[in-house]
Image (cartoon, grey):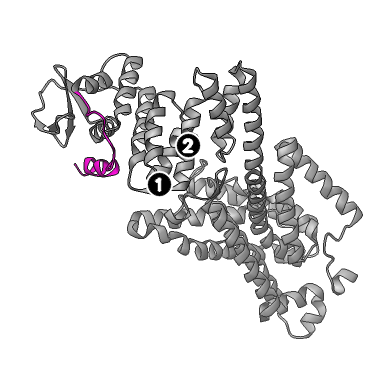
Amino acid sequence: MLKAALMASAVWGLTAAQALTMDEARGIAVGESDARIEALTQAVAQGDDKTALYLQALADDVVKIANGQVLVVRDGQGTDPVTGQAVTVPPDAEEVMLNNRLRGEIDTALAALKLFSPDVKVRRQAALALLKEPDASRAPLLEKALAAEKDPAVQGLVRQARAAALLGSEVPNERLLAARELADSRQPETLLLLNQQLSQEQEPSVKQQIQKSLAAVQDSLRWGERLGTLFTGASLGSILLLVALGLAITYGLMGVINMAHGELMMIGAYATYVVQALFREHLPGAFDAYLAVAIPVAFLTSALVGAVMERTVIQHLYGRPLETLLATWGISLVLMQAVRSLFGAQNVGVENPSWMSGSLQLLPNLQLPWNRVLIIVFAAAVLIGVALLISKTRLGLFVRGVTQNRPMASCMGVNTARIDTYAFALGSGIAGLAGCALSQVGNVGPDLGQSYIVDSFMVVVLGGVGQLAGTVYAALGLGLANKLLEGWTGAVLAKIAVLVFIIVFIQKRPQGIFAMKGRSAEA
């Protein structure tokens, strides 16, 4: 009953010309789809609150029919949709059947009736819904809504919805005026409507106006498309940056070709999955906070695995790059098989917290998903943290000293073996953070790291071995270049073009964008 009350409130202020009748209610509930849709159109044109309540009941699947009598049955209690009085529900009452076509029509009709809601946001969403699903039969209702509307923004949307409804009119002058009105639209759906009408329009003057309107709408949406491409490129670049930051330490600073870097990311992603599962089972009320726990857990888990790798295998292979490459490749296979044995070979899903769901609407054709926005912020925070750690802390000083001149650092009393372990664990932990971030934008599986290992090596080499600033420029540059080229050439050719560019660039400038400074670079 609460839903019915809310629906009545949503249509408050509606000016009814005629109340819903039992014949109309029956016509919507039974018969052939075309006849039912025609009855629905006639009922909606009256625009009264009882019609809205009845349609909401149909959408909720709580309408039954017995002996030609239509009933709304909620919680076992029957109600006459016309009079609103309680009635007895017969034992032989049958549920009203709705196919997908009828459900779509009912949803659109409800949107039309919500044009009279006291809530501006509800009216705006209703106008947008009718703009996407135009119907000439709803033009009178839109006229009534336009006359009653006071909000300028909603007025514009209702006017465009009315124009969209009249675009299919049989009167050429009405189609001409509708096409002219739609030239001011900033909605992507308008392009589809105009293109559809253009393909079947016979009147030359109307056809010419539709072409002008199409050009105007495309111009208005162009900036949204450009900004969307830039955001997608920045999002991809931020992911590449997160992936490459750990490699910039293990490979760039330490010179270790770690082919298991992708698997360290995978471990961070699975650590996030485990934390999520624990919260869902033991702390369901605090589920939205699981990511705050998962971030340090992912870092520590990957860092611990990295430290074990360094102490048991890699420390014996410094200065032998081929052996290091083969050993870490073997470790990556072991880690993938271990994950398959523990979690299975199938991908697992990591759910976004509620505050990372949805999107930020900046323009009609520009929506920024919150998970992507927050990953960009997270990547920037990790970058700042790593930069401060390397440049401002004692550990960072030791890492830079060992990287630039290991014998001299050892002579100064630095325990180089311990610093190697700390640095490798740090790079591995950052890889775990990348895995935690990646779990928020896709599925987590044993092969997660294989998709990014080549790109992360390209980022580090292009940016300049050992240079964090170069890693940033390279990651964002590659992300933007990929997305900009995809619009012209497609995903495959864009990837090939970027790879060719990197090969040519490294041939001309082997040290990358930024050359490393110090004795190690001069040797």
Q: Quadrant of the C terminus?
A: bottom right
Q: Earlier in the sequence, mark 2 or mark 1?
A: 1
> Mark 2 near mark 1, Cβ–Cβ under 8 Å?
no
Q: Mark number for residue 159?
A: 2
Q: Amino acid at mark 1?
A: Lys
Q: Position of residue 449 (x, y in %)?
A: 63, 49
* Residue 14 sits inside the magenta stretch: yes
Please report the bounds of the magenta region as a residue range.
1-21
Q: Return the residue nearer the eye: 209 or 97.
A: 209
Q: Position of residue 338 (x, y in %)?
A: 55, 50
Q: Which residue is mark 1?
A: 150
Q: Is residue 300 left or right of residue 134?
A: right
Q: Is residue 96 above or below residue 493?
A: above
Regarding mark 1 in the picture, which secondary structure is present there?
loop
Q: Return the residue nearer the eye: 267 or 211.
A: 211
Q: Position of residue 135 (x, y in %)?
A: 44, 25
Q: Return the residue nearer the eye: 447 or 92.
A: 92
Q: Quadrant of the N terminus?
A: top left
Q: Is residue 285 left or right of residue 228?
A: left
What's the CA distance linking mark 2 and mark 1? 12 Å
Q: Is residue 413 left or right of residue 339?
A: right
Q: Is residue 59 visible?
A: yes
Q: Position of residue 422 (x, y in %)?
A: 65, 72
On the image, which quarter does residue 201 sit in? top right
On the image, which quarter does residue 104 sit in? top left
Crowding around mark 1 (Cα neighbors within 10 Å: few <14, some 14 to 19, many 20+) is: few
Check the image and name the residue furthest to the left. Answer: 88
Q: Is residue 298 left or right of residue 42?
A: right
Q: Is residue 173 above or below residue 126?
A: above
Q: Residue at x 17, y 32 (%)?
A: 73
Q: Residue at x 71, y 56 (%)?
A: 475
Q: Amino acid at mark 2?
A: Arg
